[in-house]
Image: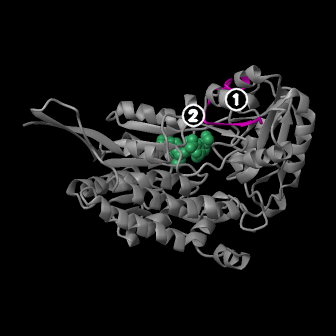
Amino acid sequence: MDQASINALRALDVTPRGHFINGAFCASETGAQHQVLSPIDGLPLAQIAEGSPTDVDTAVRAARVAFEDGRWSRMAPAARKKVLLKLGDLIEAHALEIAVLGVRDNGTEINMAYKAEALSAAATFRYYAEVIDKVYGQIAPTSHDVLGLVHHAPVGVVGAIVPWNFPLMIGSWKIAPALAAGNSVVLKPAESASLSLLKIAELAAEAGVPDGVFNVVTGRGAVVGEALALSMDVDIMVFTGSGATGRRLLEYSARSNLKRCYLELGGKSPNIIFADAPDLAEAAKISAAGIFRNSGQVCVAGSRLLVQHEIFEDFVAEITLHAESFRVGDPLELNSQIGAVHSLPELEANLDFVTQAEAEGAERRTGGTRILTETGGYYMAPTVMTGVKQSDNLFQNEVFGPVLAVTPFKDEDEAIRLANATEYGLAAGVWTANLSRAHRMVAGIRAGVVHVNTYGGADLTVPLGGVGQSGNGHDKSLHALDKYFDLKTAWIKI
Ligand code: NAD
């Protein structure tokens, strides 16, 4: 990856050719389009098809026909594996193009997007491709005159809805295991970040995924997402996004066919620094990256920093220095360490959080402002707020922006109490040299993942999912496959 190649891709026309349904691009049946702005400069980037409920029905029908006739669902797992491995290779071959495409509509810094979006998507397709011809059913321990077989049957049509932060990484976490298991998929990307996923649909067809098996319908959540989640012919929904939308999906399920909904939602993750951390300078550096990279638009961002009293002032000073030293700027410049906030409404919401926190008595140590306004893009200075109390909005609610809330604690008990004092339970960090304490903290913190002496960076081999109002499902690892199968028993009299 070099700057000249990125610059060459920067100017490409990226207007997509509509939805991807039944193996081909097509316009919305209404002909409507939706304007996408680039967070890099605030200028119009592309028109995408504004989907309608009829478009969703067309895609779901194509997915159902493909599933029922077995063109993919009854293909030998080893043959599906071959196709998905090829898709992984095609994604890798187009990695820079895909990464730049994604950055232009979502604003993530390219040096992160290249790995976390494009290369990680390639790796995800390969991982589930490699797994799928190693999944066995079971023989039940029955009496000798019957045979009880437990089959893993694909569920049918999977509806997937993904957000604008890391659309490709998160999309692949759902599409790859769903397809590997033999299902058909209808995907709805976020209306403001659809481009890279449309490219994946094109590459999937090139790799040999049959027509109708993988479909993408673009457009608004309240129209396309709602129609998908209300469809009587979608068997399960897999979703990543906000808690508010997650709740709606459960309602849609209740109002339609009781489809299972797997929800990956937000977080307000505590990152806990004990005075006995093995390397406080390293802890400050990694913790700063853990909240500020991608402008804090990371579901597992360590957005609540809990610092033990005796090191509080020194640690805050250190992390504030890191916050101020990040190079925020054009996400397509290789030397930018932090790119753009995704949209103007997101940026304004971030700034509102800071204003409200100050009104509640918090102190702004750095940041809290929009910067680089001359670019027309949406950039925000990394922000550190101290004096944030448990009852404050900034302690309790997800900003999804580059705003760190810092709170002191006395001892282990108080650290666990504060860590668990929100409705969320997605991720956490603990920094200590005391191994027993590390294990007690892992056991005591309510979260899907607890990092010890590091923050973030878990790979595909381990599940990611939340507890509490951070969700009820898991992406990644072998465990993610479970939701894409129904268990089916054959009870055979011998
Ligand atoms: P969002 O809920 O607004 O949107 C997510 C998706 O849902 C988009 O595609 C959107 O169009 C769609 N949608 C919106 N309204 C809908 C409706 N009524 N019916 C159906 N679909 C609808 O969330 P967002 O702002 O795009 O994403 C940010 C959120 O996602 C944050 O809370 C973040 O923490 C969370 N997130 C969680 C994880 C995780 O793994 N747990 C990962 C990334 C992001």
The residue most toward the left is 494
Report whether 433 appears left or right of 425. right
Going by the numbered disc 1, the residue's amino acid type is Ser
Report whether 363 appears left or right of 36. right
Quadrant containing the N terminus is bottom right
Marker count (numbered) = 2
Name the one closer to the observer, 336 or 393. Answer: 336
Residues in magenta, as a range: 418-433
Q: How is the image coloured?
A: one colour
- Look at 43% across and 31% down and name the residue there: 251
Q: Is mark 2 within 8 Å of ligand 1?
A: yes
Q: Where residue 360 sits in the image (x, y, percent)? A: 83, 26
Going by the numbered disc 2, the residue's amino acid type is Ser
Tell me: residue 213, above or below residue 383: below
- Look at 41% across and 35% down and name the residue there: 252
Badge nearest the viewer, 2 or 1: 1
Q: Where residue 228 sits in the image (x, y, percent)? A: 39, 46
What residue would you read off at disc 2?
470
What residue would you read off at disc 1?
436
Mark 2 vs mark 1, CA separation in Å: 27 Å
Is there any visible trace of residue 29 in the rendered image?
A: no
- Look at 64% across and 57% down and name the residue there: 106
